[in-house]
Amino acid sequence: MDRITSRFLIYGGLPEDSVLMQLAEVCRTLRAGEYDLGEVTSHVYAQIKKILVISTDYNFDGNLWQNYLTYLLVTAENPFTLTAEKTGGSEGTVNHFAKSDFAAFIELFHYDFSWIEDLLQTDVFSCITEYKAIEKPSLMYNGSVSEKVRALSDKLSKAADPDEFFRIMTGFYKDYGVGMFGLNKAFRIADAPDGSVIFKPVANMEHVVLSDLHGYEIQKAKLIENTEAFVEGRKANNVLLFGDSGTGKSTSIKAIVNEYYDRGLRMIEIYKYQFRFLSQLISQIKNRNYKFIIYMDDLSFEEDESEYKFLKAVIEGGLETRPDNILIYATSNRRHLVREMWTDRDDVEQNADIHRSDTMEEKLSLANRFGVTIGYYKPDRQLFHDIVKALADRNGIVMDEKELYLLSDRWEMSHGGLSGRCAGQFINHLLSEK
């Protein structure tokens, strides 16, 4: 195995602590003939445990070794894979080197571990190449990643030669991308010691679609129209969803990402205290072959908060043009985002700002940078009942409509009033009693 991995050129430079490189070191040690059996066995078991951990995280099954190698291939970001993400298997000299690496991967896919098992008197490799996973609830793993890796692994294991392996991999890179962006829909961020941004995948994003949001057809149509233009490469605007709480603003954005994921849409959620990372975040994603929505939930600013001034420059107004593959979608209970006081409008208050109109313009200018603003308001009683009935039907609740509506009315009176969120909580209550 060490001789195979030494042939890597494009996929070379794998971390030394990776399972593949550690097992290659084990093979080198065993071939040298001088080793401590207990130490080598312990080292092998540690690598098998890593494979089992990855397999549990992504619900891999069958040949875990091939699943692991496939996972390496789809997460390897290098000049070749990043180019293939945009152009697929275009002609170029680099393809010669890629196919040489793929020939090595074919050998690894079908590597015979029996000689290691004989020396160490173990059957761990036989077990992981014919593995039967324990069934797990979907919330315990990222189903989207699991399905893609397992399907790709099966195709690669049947590739007849490096040319076919090349076609399969470059096709995958073109269709889904490479790295974590290629496998996941949504991300949060954290800062790295070197000042860069680390993207952390959201493993179990709520699987909601727009049809799950009953009512608000005009609002959904405006959101779809803008997002369609965005994913198709046409001009689109930043979007602000504002209005009453519990009316489906955040749900609408999550649904948009779920529905357009297969067309290259990704979402990055960022919190107000992380706005200082916005420039770095944008610089890291602006050249990727995806469309990114930077998502800001429950966005609002108090009188003494100044982060909104920085956000204004990032959205529109700074020296650097916002990349075409990035939009900002935000939700807020406030139409104008920055808290306004009556003193902002009272021209006679003592010690008042001399240039009141300038102060008002400063506070309104952030909201004005969102080209599309969509209002979500509390439903009337009839729409509330329609939402309750739709949710009841979806969840298999059979009840006389009059009784259902009566109970829902009693519920909303003590649980925040008329809203889609209140309707959902009422249905959860009925399900808990059932």
Image (tube, rainbow, N blue to C red):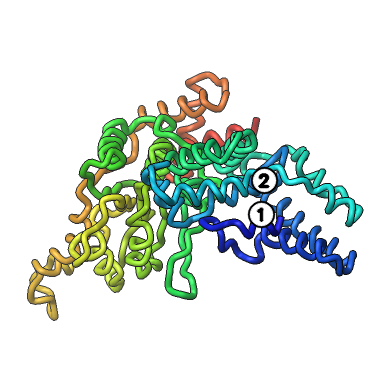
Q: Is residue 223 above or below residue 192?
A: above
Residue named by callout 1 = 4
Q: Is residue 300 above or below residue 183?
A: below
Residue 268 visible: yes
Furthest-bottom residue in this view: 351
- SS at circle 2: helix
Q: Position of residue 62 (x, y in %)?
A: 72, 38
* Residue at the (78%, 39%) spot, across then down: 130
* Front position in the image: 238 or 93: 93
**x and y percentages locating residue 320 in the rendered image:** 22, 64
Using the rendered view, name the quadrant where residue 195 is placed.
bottom left
- The local secondary structure at tag 1 comes to helix
Q: Nearer the viewer, residue 402 or 273?
A: 273
- Contact check, label 2 and label 1, Cβ < 8 Å: yes
Question: Is 406 on the left or on the right of 158, as rendered?
Answer: left
Q: Amino acid at mark 2?
A: Glu
Q: Is residue 1 left or right of residue 222?
A: right
In the picture of the structure, the residue carrying the numbered disc 2 is 107
Q: Is residue 354 above or below residue 296?
A: below
Mark 1 or mark 2, which is nearer the start of the sequence? 1
Residue 417 visible: no
Disc 1 crowd rating (10 Å Cα; few below 14, some 14-19, many 20+) is some
| Distance from the alpha carbon under mark 2 to that under mark 1 | 8 Å
Q: Which residue is rendered at x = 40% and y = 26% of the image?
A: 386
Q: Residue at x 52, y 54 (%)?
A: 76
Give the amino acid at mark 1. Ile
